[in-house]
């Protein structure tokens, strides 16, 4: 009994220590978040204070500038008034003719200067108008040229449309002829010969025409294959490849964050040197992967601007070599430390046998994924891409996508167990979810690339079939240009030989097989996408059901254990009854079993209760902190409202002062205008008096002259 009590005491102490550790961990996280929030709020308040202080200083500077302008304007007005008063006083005092003439000459000079200024202004306006008129003419001319070029392009497009319509009509005719030839061949196989063409010359002309139409159709299909389908496939492939690279970047960064939280948390204990080096290598690897995105973008720009895809052999090799070198470098630095981190996770106290098994599976599958990436990139980096079979690449991509999906499934199972650990923090769960999403994105885009490669393989087969048709049509045309004369009349009416007639259905069969393959592939791709969407929905529902079944399984295990104990006790009772043992001896094993079971159950319930209490305290502390923050923000809001009201009052005062100053300026300018008008009227009167005084002595001299003439 002493050993049992000592073990129970040790277990209870251990449970208490774990509970207190969880409490301290939750409190530390809360305190850290509160300190960070307070620091952020202090920084925001400081920035707002500096902004408002600068705005207030700006307003004060503007007010001082307006006051200085007002003072300067008052001084200038005073000086103008003094100068006007002095000029009027001098004009009243001076009455001599010379001084009056001098003043008159001065006024004349001022008017001449004003006229010259007006002429200069008029000349400048005329030049500006001339430049504007010339610019308008140039714009009209450019518009006319653009309209003419647009009409020419439209006419060219209409001509091309007519030509394309003609080619379409010819292709329809050729299709009808091929159908007729197939019907004739069927009739001929039924041993009923038919004379199809009356004259051998007409037959040769029809064959040449069909040959030309076949060549035009093959060239057109090849151009469409090169420009439309291949370009879309390559662009979609590059888009998926870029998404895979970004998925690797996110995966490496999240794994570096995870290494700082699990199995050792850097906020509570110092990390080992190997774990720190592992995190640094993951960050360097993500940075090296970011350099591949620029290369993919450059390659995409080249693909958009080019028409011939055979020129991109070196670019594809270069891109694959860059990806392979980055992956090899990262694998050489990361994988050894990755193994050490898995071993450190296995040495943790809470690592069970099931979790250790999941860790080992995840490690092996992740290493397999990296190796399959290398092998696929080596296939793309081969020097003889043209000689490489498409089947090897498609199979390699299929294996790679399967490996990525297996790695994602293993990691989901692993984190499902890790998140149920009592010491698992919210941050660790969030990081695990991010890693899971990164694996899922990589797997999804690899599946898409596999589908694209399969589509490209079918297009290559279509191209080979079209080349076969082209060779067969050339053979028919070469045989038809040199017809052999036949002595019989029946044979002269049929210049086609048996071999040539057998090639015609082959061409029709190859063209129809290529079209059926393309339609079948499109249908398969659509069905595959629908299946993927359906399976994703099924997987999400299955995961929910799995969690529910896990809880039910635990309850069922407990019930099964109780039933087993009861069954064993009943069996023992029956044995004891048959053997005649005492009742006390029968009850002892049952008591022990029940005691051990309920002790374990009570320990589990106490642990769960402590966890729930710690969570409740954590949430209570968070609510208290949030209430305090709300109170602080309310007080700050009221203070800022008061400050804004004071600033608005100051702005209103400044606006009123500005309006009064503007009104005073308007009144002063009006008085000055009136005074100037009075002065100009006075000057006009004085000029009239001067002219009258100049005219009187001339009139007196004329009167004296007339008087003298009369006396004589």
Image (cartoon, helix red, strand yellow):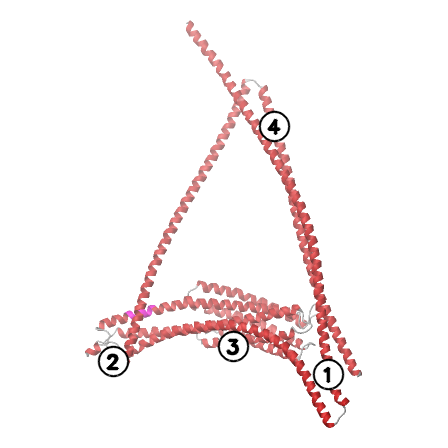
Q: Tell me, yes or no, whether the two marked residues, 1 and 3, touch with CB atoms within 8 Å.
A: no
Point out the frontmost of discs 2 and 1.
Answer: 1
Q: Mark 3 packing: few (<14 Cα in 10 Å), some, or many (20+)? A: some
Tell me what residue is drawn at x 63 percent, y 68 percent. 430
| Disc 1 packing (10 Å; few <14; some 14–19; many ≥20) | some
Which residue corresponds to mark 4? Answer: 81
The part of the chain drawn in magenta is: 209-216
First-in-chain label (2 vs 1): 2
Can you see residue 523? yes
The quarter of the image holding the C terminus is top left
In this picture, residue 531 sits left or right of residue 664: left
The x and y percentages for residue 587 are 75, 87
State how far apart marks 4 and 1 are (Cα). Answer: 117 Å
Find residue 196 and report its horizontal and vertical position in percent: 24, 75
- Answer whether residue 214 is magenta in the image: yes
Q: What residue do we see at 44% from left, 42% from top?
A: 132
Distance Cα–Cα, label 4 vs label 3: 99 Å
Q: Dot 2: within a 10 Å radius of its alpha carbon, few (fewer than 14), some, or many (20 or more) residues? A: few
- Is the C-beta separation of discs 2 and 3 under 8 Å? no
Which residue bears the numbered disc 3? Answer: 399
Give the secondary structure at mark 4: helix
Asked if the residue at tag 1 contacts the one at tag 4, i.e. Cβ–Cβ closer than 8 Å, the answer is no
First in sequence, mark 4 or 3: give its number. 4
Q: Nearer the viewer, residue 534 or 589?
A: 589
User: Circle 2 sits on which residue?
Assistant: 192
Upstream in the sequence, badge 1 or badge 3? Answer: 3
Nearer to us in this view, 291 or 136: 136
Relative to 606, residue 625 above or below: above
């Amino acid at each position: 009994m002493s050993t049992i009590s000592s073990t129970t005491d040790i277990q209870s102490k251990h449970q208490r220590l774990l509970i207190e550790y969880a409490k301290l961990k939750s409190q530390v996280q809360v305190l850290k978040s509160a300190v960070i929030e307070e620091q952020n709020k202090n920084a925001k308040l400081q920035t707002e204070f500096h902004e408002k202080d600068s705005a207030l200083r700006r307003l004060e500077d503007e007010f001082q500038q307006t006051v200085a302008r007002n003072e300067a304007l008052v001084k200038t007005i005073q000086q103008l008034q003094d100068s006007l008063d002095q000029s009027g006083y001098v004009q009243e005092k001076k009455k001599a003719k010379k001084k009056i003439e001098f003043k008159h000459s001065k006024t004349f000079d001022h008017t001449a200067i004003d006229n010259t200024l007006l002429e200069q202004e008029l000349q400048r306006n005329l030049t500006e108008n001339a430049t504007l008129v010339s610019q308008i003419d140039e714009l009209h001319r450019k518009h006319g040229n653009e309209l003419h070029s647009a009409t020419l392009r439209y006419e060219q497009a209409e001509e091309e449309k007519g030509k394309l319509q003609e080619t379409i009509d010819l292709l329809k005719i050729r299709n009808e002829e091929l159908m007729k030839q197939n019907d004739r061949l069927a009739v001929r196989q039924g041993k009923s010969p038919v004379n199809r063409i009356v004259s051998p010359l007409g037959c040769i002309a029809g064959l040449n025409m069909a040959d030309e139409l076949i060549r035009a159709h093959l060239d057109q299909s090849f151009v469409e294959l090169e420009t439309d389908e291949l370009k879309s496939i390559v662009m979609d492939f590059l888009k998926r490849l870029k998404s895979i690279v970004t998925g690797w970047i996110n995966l490496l960064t999240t794994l570096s964050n995870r290494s700082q939280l699990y199995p050792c948390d850097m906020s509570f204990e110092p990390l080992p040197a190997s774990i720190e080096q592992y995190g640094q290598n993951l960050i360097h690897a993500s940075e090296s992967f970011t350099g591949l995105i620029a290369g993919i973008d450059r390659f995409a720009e080249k693909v958009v601007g080019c028409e011939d895809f055979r020129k991109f052999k070196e670019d594809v090799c270069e891109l694959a070599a860059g990806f392979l070198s980055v992956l090899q470098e990262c694998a050489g630095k990361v994988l050894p430390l990755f193994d050490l981190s898995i071993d450190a996770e296995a040495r943790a106290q809470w690592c069970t046998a099931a979790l250790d098994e999941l860790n080992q599976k995840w490690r092996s599958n992740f290493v397999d994924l990296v190796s399959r990436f290398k092998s696929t990139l080596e296939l793309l980096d081969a020097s003889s891409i043209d000689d490489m079979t498409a089947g090897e690449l498609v199979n390699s991509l299929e294996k790679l996508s399967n490996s990525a999906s297996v790695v994602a499934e293993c990691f989901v199972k692993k984190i499902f167990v890790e998140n149920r650990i009592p010491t698992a923090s919210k941050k660790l769960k969030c990081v695990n979810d991010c890693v899971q999403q990164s694996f899922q994105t990589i797997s999804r885009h690899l599946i898409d690339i596999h589908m694209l490669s399969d589509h490209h393989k079918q297009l290559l087969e279509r191209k080979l079939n079209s080349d076969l048709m082209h060779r067969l049509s050339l053979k028919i045309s070469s045989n038809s240009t040199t017809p052999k004369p036949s002595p019989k009349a029946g044979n002269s009416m049929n210049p086609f030989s048996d071999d040539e007639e057998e090639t015609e259905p082959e061409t029709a069969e190859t063209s129809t097989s290529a079209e059926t393959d393309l339609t079948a592939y499109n249908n398969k791709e659509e069905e595959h996408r629908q299946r993927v969407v359906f399976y994703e929905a099924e997987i999400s529902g299955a995961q929910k059901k799995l969690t529910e079944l896990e809880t039910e399984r635990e309850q069922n295990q407990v019930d099964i254990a109780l039933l087993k104990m009861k069954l064993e006790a009943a069996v023992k009772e029956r044995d004891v009854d048959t053997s005649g043992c005492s009742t006390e001896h029968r009850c002892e094993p049952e008591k022990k079993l029940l005691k051990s079971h309920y002790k374990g159950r009570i320990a589990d319930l106490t642990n769960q209760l402590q966890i729930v209490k710690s969570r409740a305290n954590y949430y209570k502390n968070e609510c208290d902190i949030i209430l305090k923050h709300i109170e602080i923000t309310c007080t700050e809001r009221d203070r800022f409202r008061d400050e804004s009201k004071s600033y608005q009052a100051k702005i209103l005062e400044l606006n009123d002062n500005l309006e009064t100053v503007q009104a005073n300026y308007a009144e002063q300018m009006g008085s000055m205008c009136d005074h100037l008008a009075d002065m100009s009227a006075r000057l006009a009167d004085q000029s009239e008096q001067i002219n009258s005084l100049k005219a009187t002595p001339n009139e007196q001299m004329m009167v004296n002259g007339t008087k003298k003439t009369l006396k004589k």
